Amino acid sequence: MADLNNLSTLQHQLNKTNTRLRRLLALIARYKEAYTIQGALLKLSELASSISDMAEFYPAIHKMVSELLHAENFYVVLYDSETTEYSLQYFSDEKDQQLIVSVPSSAFSSGLTGYVVRTQQPLLCDEAQFETLVSSGEIQSQGSPSAHWMGIPLLREDKVIGVMAIQSYDPAYRYNEHDLKLFNSIGSNTVIALDRVKSRELLETTVRQRTLQLRQTNESLQKEIKERIHAEKLQAALYEISELTASSQDMQTFYRAMHKVLCGLMAADNCYIALLDQDGTKLTFPFYLDQFSPAASDRPLGKGFTEYVIRCAEARLINSEEAAQLVERGEIRRGIGSLNQPHRNSSSWLGAPLKVDQRVLGVIAVQSYETGYQYTEQELTILRFVSQHIAVAIQRKLASERQRQHQEELERKVFESTRELRQTNLFLRLQVEERKKAEQKLFYDANHDVLTGLANRQMFLQQLKQQFALIKRQSQPGMALLFLDLDRFKLINDTLGHHIGDAFLIESSKRLLSAIREHDVAARFGGDEFVVMLLNLQSFQDAEEVAQRIIDKFRQPYQLDGHKTQSGVSIGIAPLTMEYHHADALLRDADAAMYHAKALGRGRYAVFQAEMRDQMLKALSN
């Protein structure tokens, strides 16, 4: 009985120990969970402190979540409750990474993301639950189906501002409530971190804007300094202009130098000088530089800006508004600069009269086409002063210019006379050259086939006789004649037409030239007959090798203007021996050998034998 009591006591103590152990394990698990969440929140806080660019924030969140959960597939979508619009902020997925580019952000409203936004509750969703939600019409199936999906709402003051989700395509992996709790804790603090990063980003934007304002203030100061420097440059420029009147060799040099000085004082990319002719009825433009118009031609007086300044005899600053008023009053008419070129109106125009002894000689003007640029009264004053110096320089130099032009006219006449003699000599030389070329062409045409460019019968027979006489004096002639007749030429010519026949002959001549050697001579005798004179043969077997090479070339199919056809060639070979006394006999025997080759079946060659001549004579007698 005592033993039973002891056993009962031990059992009771064991149960109490097990209960304490379970409580301890549960407590350890909660501590571990709390430690994990605390570590995640600490990392999240570090991210919020170290990152100032939203483009870096979301990848960092993804990396942190991946260290705690199975989160290879992760995305963040923000939601605007006022506009009910969704905006994808970050997306990393092993299957739909390429597909997401073409998916509009509004599509998230009908999927699991939109469901979490509407319910404002975290969601664990497996395949079965997914099908249930689809069947009930709560969501629509989108993208690649996942094995398990987990998403949490991102809340700011109990208002959903987005959804953060992870999903797994591995059926063996399932998220649990512990994962959801951890993920939800991360999500709730992600909003805080997000606001901190955005605040820092906004702060940096504000700093950049303030920096820009300071830079603009600095630019304003720089502009003031530049204006002071400009005033100093003006003094130097006025002195330089006074020096130009004495230092410039001619008017064009003076105009260019003057323009260079003006460019240092104001915007003078578009500048011209207009002068009145002696009658005062026409304007000439000795200097004209414009970014949109070619050099201006002489024209009669009209109602342009230039004529307006001449009538007023005073410098004028004309901007777009004043120009419109002058047009309305009938003082000017815009667009008369060139009748042949499209006209572009200036946005600001500055002109001053060129006066000497109160007489207006012309106008110097600058203009701008940039709507944001307007000339100032200061620049008008500068141009008014410059114009006085230019007018004096023009009057002084016109006389010397006329003298120079007179001298140049004399030199030009002498040059013209000399050039006429040279041209006459050149013409005579050209006539001689043309006659030589004509003679060369006549000689070429007389000795070459018009269609193929090969030597013709006349030229070939002449070269044959020359080579025959030369080689006959040698102990080993080393020469042979090939007489060629093309197979099926008449059939091709009659069936496919003469233009195909001509193309056939041209292609055959090219194949012939590609088969013979460089020092051999090829000719067309007429029709479909060709001859080849083989020179410098080491043995008569060389002639047979060349003939076989020609046969192989001609055996290949012809492509003639879309027509594919076959042909061939029969060749007679007549080697030169000491028995021949006339070149004509060698050609006759090559012809006889060719007919013998055709009789044997075409597409082959035959070397001349004496009996071939007898057979030909016998055939002629019958």
Image (cartoon, helix red, strand yellow):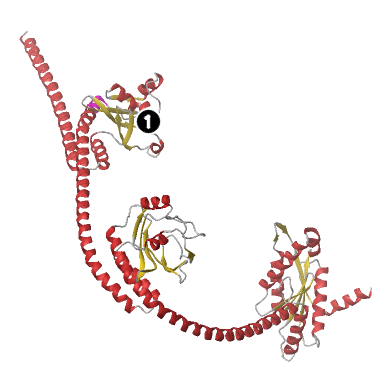
Q: Is residue 503 visible?
A: yes
Q: Amino acid at mark 1?
A: Ser
Query: In the drawing, does residue 278 fall left or right of residue 241?
Result: right
Q: Is residue 291 above or below residue 250?
A: above
Reading the image, the residue beneath label 1 is 106
Determine crowd level at label 1: few under 14, some 14-19, many 20+ residues with C-alpha closer than 10 A: some
Tell me the quarter of the picture where residue 234 sits. bottom left
Query: In the drawing, does residue 153 fall left or right of residue 437?
Result: left
Secondary structure category for the residue under label 1:
helix
Q: Is residue 536 visible?
A: no
Estimate the x, y position of residue 263 in percent, counting from the top left.
32, 65
The span picked out in magenta is 176-181
Which residue is drawn at the image coordinates 29% and 24% (left, top)? 123
Which residue is drawn at the image coordinates 25% and 40% (left, top)? 54
Dominant secondary structure, magenta = helix
* Residue 179 is covered by the magenta coloring: yes
Which residue is drawn at the image coordinates 40% and 20% (left, top)? 137
Estimate the x, y position of residue 580 in percent, counting from the top left.
80, 86
Is the N terminus in the top left, top right, bottom left or bottom right quadrant?
Answer: top left
Is the C terminus in the top left, top right, bottom left or bottom right quadrant?
Answer: bottom right
Q: Residue furthest front?
A: 358
Q: Is residue 125 above or below residue 506?
A: above
Which residue is drawn at the image coordinates 32% and 55% (left, top)? 374
